[in-house]
Amino acid sequence: MVALQRNLWVALVSIIGILGAFSCTVDGVPRRILLDTDVDTDDFFALLYLLKLNRSEFELEAVTINTNAWTDAGHAVNQIYDILYMMDRDDIPVGVGGEGGILENGTILPNVGGYLPMIEQGLSTAGYCRYRQAIPIGLGGRLDIDSNYGIRKAFLPQGNRKYSPLQQPTAQQVLINKISAGPISVFLIGAHTNFAIFLMSNPHLKKNIEHIYVMGGGVRSKNPTGCCPSNSTSTCQPQQCGDPGNLFTDYTSNPYAEFNVFGDPFAAYQVIHSGIPVTLVPLDATNTIPISQEFFDTFEQSQGTYEAQYCFQSLKMARDTWFDDQFYTSYFMWDSFTSGVAVSIMKNGHNNNGENEFAVMEYMNITVVTSNQPYGISDGSNPFFNGLKVPKFHLKKGGVHSGHVQTGLRDPFCIVKNSKGKCKDGYTEETTGPESVRVLVATRAKPNRDGKSPLDREFFRSFLDVLNNPLQTGRFNFTTQFPYYKQVLYKPDLRTKKLGKPVIFDMDMSAGDFIALFYLLKVPMEVIDLKAILVSPTGWANAATIDIIYDMLHMMGRDDIPVGLGKVFALNQSDAIFSAVGDCKYVKAIPHGSGGLLDSDTLYGLARTLPRSPRRYTAENSQKFGAPRNTDHPELRQPLALEIWDSVVSSLKPRSKITILTNGPLTNLANIILANATASHFIQDVYIVGGHINRSISDRGNVFTILSNRYAELNMFLDPLAAKKVFDSDINVTLIPLGVQRRISLFSKVLKGLDKTERTPEAQFVHRLLSRLGRLKKNNHRYYHMDIFLGEVLGAVILAGDHSSLKPTFSIKPIKVFAEGFESKDGYTYIDNAGKSVKLLENVDPRAFYDLFSQQLGNEKQSAVIGSFDDQKRMWSTPSNRTENSS
Ligand SMILES: [Ca+2]
Ligand SMILES: [Ca+2]
């Protein structure tokens, strides 16, 4: 394979040499560019820079989204759509995801979504987070990037394009369309999964790729951060100081890798070794262009366009929430700088030494390390070889891919006592011989030619000039789009109401949880007083999806209900050394793509039809709560689940107690118990939707992606230790297990009920959502499990009471939950005489359930105050701005 590639390389270089020379001599034909991005902050700086270039010279043809790095697909794709809408570029195709897999024999099926690194890619989109676990999930990580610190929804306008299940063009479709259409340059500013899969599946299209520009790797780089000052005491431990890489969460095992290449080392190897000419902008160069205070201050004064404002506000929030006071020396221009260097090289017709305005270039011979020596071992770390007669992709036994592959954070193989880690996975290492590829490497950023300017890098000047160019500029932002835009909070007048029992709803934002939330909001306040919502981002949705809850509350006129965000890791899953990162032992059961996180994070494409709330997740924060400096609006900070719990408890009337409904993993409840020895004194009852008591060998649970686990139910499986903590406590538990949920999960029945009821906005929304789930379930096997979500609604109906027609039957059983760390049994709930005495819902009358459910949603009382985003747009476009603000 290697020999073949080398021959191909020689042949291709000569073809591309000719093509390259040809295309730069043709006047008037713009150079075509495809951008593959993981939609981090710096990525949309790069995107906007490219969108602002003269279109007779450069045409951005498409954006494909890398889904296994710093963002989650549903949030990333909608941010790209919003940016393109603001820039009036709805013509640019966007590709994301796909449901294809890779067979054990290495056959790559069409439309692999790239949610997993190639080494973990099987047939579905569920799989292990071997490399991605080095990326923080919550603050400073995917939560902040998915939401762009909360700025995205405050700033970006929303057009008509959006993710929609099975309608969304996949990354591979877009790559194939655009690359087969003619010569093109590809910019890679995330992990390389999408593009490697494209190259391996479509070798005949390589001829159209003129050049690949990569932000990634570190060749001779020496990390400038984490160094001890020269006058420091002996207690100062240098951290990444002088390392080639930048894995700040995992440098103790791998000081060599840079995040983009580490995201999928095998994919990066395929790209670098593809035979197509590559220009690399590694840490060597980006380390020399930190965001200086002078640049920051100049940027603050140069916000002449919406796109410049969006970039500056984002950069400012990144600075204000940076984890230490070293922002100006440790935040670099990565992807934006790369786009500048690439475009400048292309402008110069890609002459031999890649001369350009912004970076010094040099040819180097490198490879990408995908496994660690000694090669040919079988220690179970390498799925390309382990247990396979023929290695995957016919890789060579004993070859460079056959060594130990880093298994995750703190892999013991990688740790060397009293010394730096030894794993090099993802290292763009200089090498000689048959494994080496000659690539053009940016080695440092060029200084500003104007030596008197406060901007000390030539690219700083270009970046601000381009972003502030009045041509091809953004049309409006979210608020200026509408002549009568007005920010309103809707709150009911509770003074005259006699409120019912205080309730907290704890949800993991699966589709059924949102329907349950609607239901709870419809139950008369005299019956239940919904005090607060807690969110467990440890299940079906990512943390940034909390915004859908805010939007739904806004729609229902309940902007008074507080929402608390729980911990992003299940119990014992966060890393002992660096708690922002951790393992995915359980949450890996949730598919990333169709029917999984992608759909939850967008509520199956329907979230954007909800009215947009002024409340949303925001990284706004103050020093008091851990930010290094106060942001502009520290009072807006997203509350934590435990804080909301404390405030609800302290507002209780004497002798009053809280009833809790949990519709997700029990992470929040367990953390409440762990943090408050007296928590149970304030809890009346807990209704737990989840658990499965199997009645026979064939009575399976629903952990459908982990075949070895036959009997567990997902809410228990996703955090078995939390479940155990709750079942070991003295809290009164009513369990609504899988068996009884399955009795009420017929889409046809519930839709028939909704057809008969009044068309309140909420009934219409639920109807649309459920009919979409039902249709998807019928038409595509990825959606086979949709009835799980319909069953989830039962907890809210039981908790709300009025049981006369439902005829529920309960039993009292001693129940235990298995949580010993075995994937095949964890989360299993079973009857055991030593177990906790639990009230178990055995049965309900399904017909009464469907009636009760649809009648409640159709009730005109406690109905929506604003029906949809379209209603909101109409309101903001007409002068008679509605002012009432109660339900
Ligand atoms: Ca990136
Ligand atoms: Ca749920």
Image: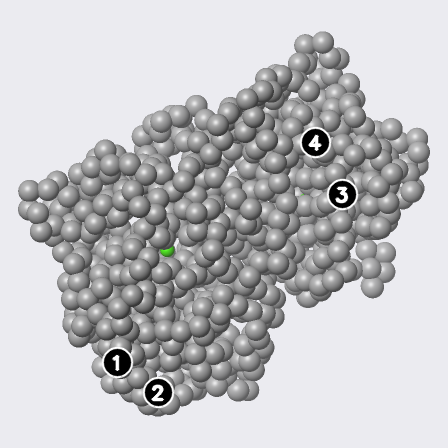
| Amino acid, disc 1 | Gly
Q: Is residue 504 left or right of residue 739?
A: left
On the image, the x and y values in percent for residue 536 come to 59, 41
Classify 396 as above or below 125.
below
Classify 747 as above or below 203.
above
Q: Is residue 572 visible?
A: no
Quarter where residue 851 is shown: top right
Residue occupied by mark 1: 17
Residue occupied by mark 2: 8
* Circles 2 and 3 in contact, beta carbons < 8 Å: no
On the image, the x and y values in percent for residue 827 come to 68, 52
Q: CA distance from mark 2 to mark 3?
A: 55 Å
Name the secondary structure under disc 2.
helix
Q: CA distance from mark 4 to mark 2?
A: 64 Å
Which mark is nearer the camera, 4 or 3?
3
Q: Residue furthest front?
A: 28
Quarter where residue 15 is shown: bottom left
| Viewer-nearest residue: 659 or 429 | 429
| Amino acid, disc 3 | His
* Circles 2 and 1 in contact, beta carbons < 8 Å: no
Disc nearer the start of the sequence (4/1): 1
Residue occupied by mark 3: 767
Disc nearer the start of the sequence (4/2): 2
Disc nearer the start of the sequence (2/1): 2
The response on whether ligand 1 sits within 8 Å of label 1 is no
| Amino acid, disc 4 | Ile
Name the secondary structure under disc 4.
strand
Residue occupied by mark 4: 660
Q: Check disc 2: other Cα within 10 Å, few if <14, some if 14-19, many if 20+.
A: some
| Viewer-nearest residue: 482 or 198 | 482
Quarter where residue 656 is shown: top right
